[in-house]
Amino acid sequence: MAAKVITAANVLAGPNARITPVVYGETVTAGKAVYRKAADGRYYLADANDATKHAAAGIALNGGAAGQPGSVVTEDDDFTPGCAMSIGEILVVGAEATGDIAPSADLAEGWYPTVLGVAKGTTKMVLKPVAAGAVIPAV
């Protein structure tokens, strides 16, 4: 499988979403998984291949460049991530490119898994990030 193809214009928060105002530390587009860097408090693109960047806080609701304000959806029972999904599909932080969202079937050795949520429809998901905090070992 591969990372989900996100249409940034289709990323929408649901009516009960928890949205956090942020400042981006690098260029971010809507629909990308982001984490908060403790050193500067800014939000950067998450990466499942990196022990310091895998624990996504949520998904960017809008884009922006480094130093610009943005909004991150941290929890949402009716989130539209802007990609096609299968009902019951578990979505995780990906590793092809920073900020990617991928199906859990892509999890592989060397990844630091962070579950983003579960698809409840073909365009909607329950978003509630949970980071394992451990690397997937070699088998």
Image (spheres, grey):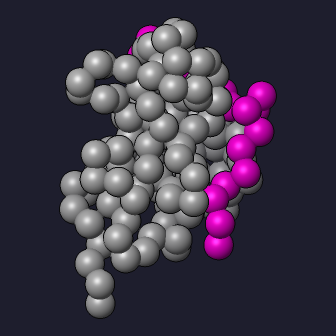
Image quadrant where one finds the N terminus? bottom right
Percent coordinates x, y for residue 35 in the rendering: 38, 34
The total of numbered circles placed on residues is: 0
Q: Is residue 54 left or right of residue 2?
A: left
Q: Quadrant of residue 81?
A: top right
Question: Dominant secondary structure of the magenta stretch?
Answer: loop
Give 107 or 88, whichever is nearer the viewer: 107
Residue 131, relative to residue 36: is it above or below? below
Magenta run includes residue 11: yes
Residue farthest to the bottom, as pictured: 139
Can residue 59 be seen? yes
Residue 117 screen position, x and y as percent: 46, 49
- Asked where in the image residue 137 lies, by quadrant, the reply is bottom left
Q: Position of residue 107 (x, y in %)?
A: 45, 70
Task: Give 77 or 113, whichever is nearer the viewer.
Answer: 113
- Seen at 63% across and 59% down, the residue is 3
Q: Is residue 34 above or below residue 17?
A: below
> Would residue 130 be visible to someone looking at this image?
no
Residue 23 included in the magenta stretch of the image: no
Q: Position of residue 124 (x, y in %)?
A: 64, 43
For the point 45% across and 22% down, the residue is: 25
Q: Quadrant of the C terminus?
A: bottom left
Q: Residue at x 35, y 44 (%)?
A: 53
**Which residue: 53% across, 47% down?**
98
As drawn, is 5 to the left or to the right of 92? right
Q: Horizontally, is 92 left or right of 14 in the view?
A: left
Magenta stretch: give its range.
1-21
